[in-house]
Amino acid sequence: MPTGIIGFPDDKRYILLEHKKGSSFLWFQSVDNGSLAFVLIDPFLFKPDYEIQLNPDDILGLGLENGSEGIEGVQPLAIVNILKTEPREITANLLGPIVLNLRKKLARQVILHHKRYSHRFPIPQVKEEKVP
Amino acid sequence: MLILTRRVGESITIGDHIKVYVIDIKGRQVRLGIKAPSDTTVYRQEIYQKILEENRLAAQIGVASIREATEGKE
């Protein structure tokens, strides 16, 4: 991640891990800082009409400038938060997703302006049977 | 913080690579143009702040929290 995650500019290398078998959640674990990790989720699982829009800096930062990546090579993942409510509300940051260029293994936190997405979009109960 | 007063059409250079132009002023709104190298991202402050805080909170989530919160949901 050339520019790191906002607020964590020095941590640029991460690995993507499954939370547990069959889970929709993923862990984005910093390689250089063992105690830094984020829970991510594919926003299309609960918002099928989710749309990202990349500006020229995003395209450059993700190594997409040749246009050789189809939409399939670009995957947005939303950072998950857990609110201190009772019961715990799980939310996804749809305003600033981590966008991955899968082929080049590059990632970037992109801020979206084209739609008014929430930084705290509630994730509904995701039952395993419903996840394709 | 350095505070400057600029008129429409004037600009500011920050370091060697960043330029801020005052393009237009309408009432209480200022239209700014910003030239910066591609490895420097420009953010609207309130949005940057929102994302920054959200990221910081999210970084505190441990395996136990996600397990507890998703009990019965996953």
Image (cartoon, coloured by chain):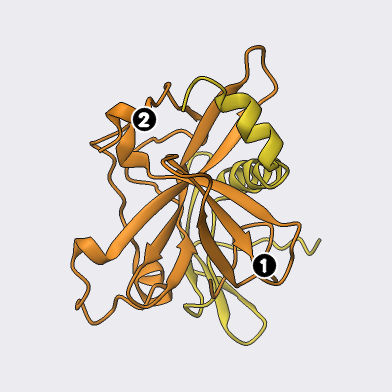
Chain colours: A orange, B yellow
Q: Taking B50 as reference, is B73 left or right?
A: left
Picture coordinates of residue B60 (x, y %)?
73, 43
Kindly give the residue lying farthest to the front in the view shown.
Answer: A21
Q: Is residue A45 above or below residue A59?
A: above
What residue lies at 33% left-to-right and 57% top-to-bottom? A75
Quarter where residue A22 is shown: top left
The disc at residue A128 is 2
What residue lies at 38% left-to-right and 44% top-to-bottom? A42
Q: Nearer the viewer, residue B5 or B2?
A: B2
Q: Is residue A63 above or below residue A76?
A: below
Pointer 2 or 1: first along the chain: 1
Q: Amino acid at mark 2?
A: Glu
Are the residues under marks 2 and 1 on the same chain? yes
Chain of residue at mark 2: A
Picture coordinates of residue B31 (x, y %)?
46, 54
Crowding at mark 2 (Cα within 10 Å: few <14, some 14-19, many 20+): few
Q: Secondary structure at mark 1?
A: loop
Q: Taking B3 as reference, is A130 left or right?
A: left
Residue at the spot of label 1? A9
Kindly give the residue lying farthest to the top in the view shown.
Answer: A86
Picture coordinates of residue A23 (x, y %)?
45, 39
- The quarter in which the C terminus of chain A is drawn is top left
Q: How many marks?
A: 2
Chain of residue at mark 1: A
Question: Cα distance, mark 2 to mark 1?
Answer: 35 Å
Of labels 2 and 1, the one closer to you: 2
What residue lies at 23% left-to-right and 36% top-to-bottom? A49
Q: Secondary structure at mark 2?
A: helix
